[in-house]
Image (cartoon, rainbow, N blue to C red):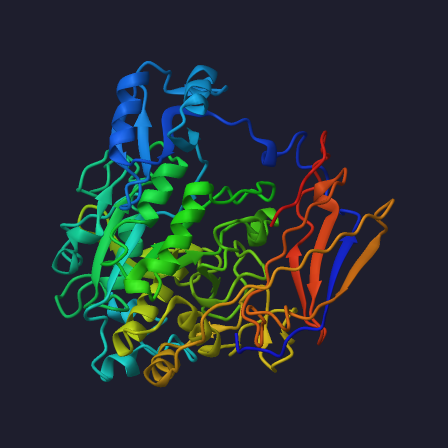
Amino acid sequence: MRPVPTVQWLRLALVLALALVGLLSTGWAFARTPIYVSSWAVRVSQGYQDAERLARKFGFVNLGQIFPDGQYFHLKHRGVVQQSLTPHWGHRLRLQKDPKVQWFEQQKLQRRVKRSLVRPKDPWFSKQWYMNNQVRPNLNILPVWSQGLTGQGVVVSVLDDGIEKDHPDLWANYDPLASYDFNDYDPDPQPRYTANDENRHGTRCAGEVAAVANNGFCGTGVAYNARIGGVRMLDGTITDIIEAQSLSLMPQHIDIYSASWGPEDDGRTVDGPGILTREAFRRGVTTGRGGLGTLFVWASGNGGLHYDNCNCDGYTNSIHTLSVGSTTKQGRVPWYSEACASTLTTTFSSGVVTEPQIVTTDLHHRCTEKHTGTSASAPLAAGMIALALEANPLLTWRDMQHLVVRASRPAQLQAEDWRTNGVRRRVSHHYGYGLLDAGLLVKLARTWQPTQPQLKCILHILHRPITILPQTEVPKNVSACAGHANAIRSLEHVQVRLSLTYSRRGDLEISLVSPMGTRSTLVAIRDAVPLHAAVIWDG
């Protein structure tokens, strides 16, 4: 993302296209009925004292602060049913009337799925084709190791279903300070074992990052001397509180959070982080790592079979996350891959079942060569970013986004949508800026000059057509806040918050066209589900 000259015209194109696919079903996942649980997030003016007072007065149990500053607290009521289709109006009214309560929210179940593909478990460095020079180009990791960079001093935490901390390939790098179990609220992230090993996902992702080298077991992690932690948060009730606490764990200790999960990749769901999780992202990038900003690495999603679009995932399309896509060994778009404008970079994973997959650690002290999906791509990127952080620990979260863009190459990646943007960078909705090159990433990191402080210029556009035509364009002449303290001289991110009403959500395609003609598809044609109510797009 090289800074580009100030935009002078933005054109927002709303293209209504007739969907050529049949109706997926009646109803729509975007309007899934919420399920309320017996937990409340409360912000109070006097901190712990007020939280304790509320707990005694209304019968709550104070489970402690959500963030370290002592303003947000987690309250639970044992007299309220664990799950309900309706909120508890009595407690709502009581909290509303209390003058010391600044904000509260009864928590709802969040539907989050691990972005892994279910494959038979079969089974080390010789099998790690994506970084042992069996393919060209590859992730170019060997030259970085030869420079003595192995992730030393960098801490990575995998937010998932736990990690097997006593695994022979993980225990030496395991970091208890970067670990916690938010499903059971204890310090041990050991996964819950089941008959079908459904909680293997986090252990597999952790091994990609920091499996120990030269110990005669499994393969080698990309950053094999990095400290690795695990947060168990996907194996139980998932709420906004749990997501926010997971993303806020030890932000001055953990450098990189790797996440390979999100809303359902079913081609219909439009979902994203709640109020507390958005606040966790904001706090992470502004105060994490001593103010340099936490690095959130995110898998882009596995909904390709359902024509899903990761722009409709509020985690991957956040400017605070570094979204990672997948390519096969042959440089093709995998069948599960999702295309979206928010993807910045790509690493390897698998294609069809007969193609090579990713080698990593597995449950029960075993190894596997069957890890796949974008779940396998994001941890590879997290490991490579750890190598860059070892080379230059002073990189900010925005610095790293700039570096990842510059260190990603189109290489042999095959797609029909490759375009050259206004600063002559090749970019694709499938791959972002291309295959991430660890050698180039580290080289750039060593000499990178810090970016200037981030500025925000907000533009309001009001357009009320009587009817939305098959192609409706909304042009806007903008000055980028010239003459004001927040004037933009170069552009990193564009965020569009769009509200519109239309009868068939799935027939909408929304694009943003830059002054130099680069088209970014913000929402692609997805489902053809007829709506029984107006849809408000806000993304």
Where is 354 relative to 483, above or below? Answer: above
Q: Observer-nearest residue: 133 or 405?
A: 405
Q: Position of residue 204 (x, y in %)?
A: 29, 53
- Residue 44 in view, yes or no: yes
Q: Is residue 507 left or right of residue 148?
A: right
Q: How many marks?
A: 0
Q: Position of residue 234 (x, y in %)?
A: 34, 40
Along the line of sight, which residue is nearer the eye, 535 or 494?
Answer: 494
| Residue 240 position (above or below residue 400) | above
> Residue 135 occupies which quadrant of the picture?
bottom left
Give percent across and percent down for residue 374.
44, 56
219 relative to 80, above or below: below
Q: Which residue is more in the foreground, 503 or 301?
A: 503
- Residue at 52%, 67% (x, y): give it: 455
Q: Residue placed at 66% from the left, 59% from the top?
A: 459
Identify whether 265 is placed above or below 436: above
Percent coordinates x, y for residue 436 in the rendering:
43, 73
Q: Is residue 17 left or right of residue 334?
A: right
Left or right of 463 in this view: 293: left
Q: Is residue 122 visible?
A: no
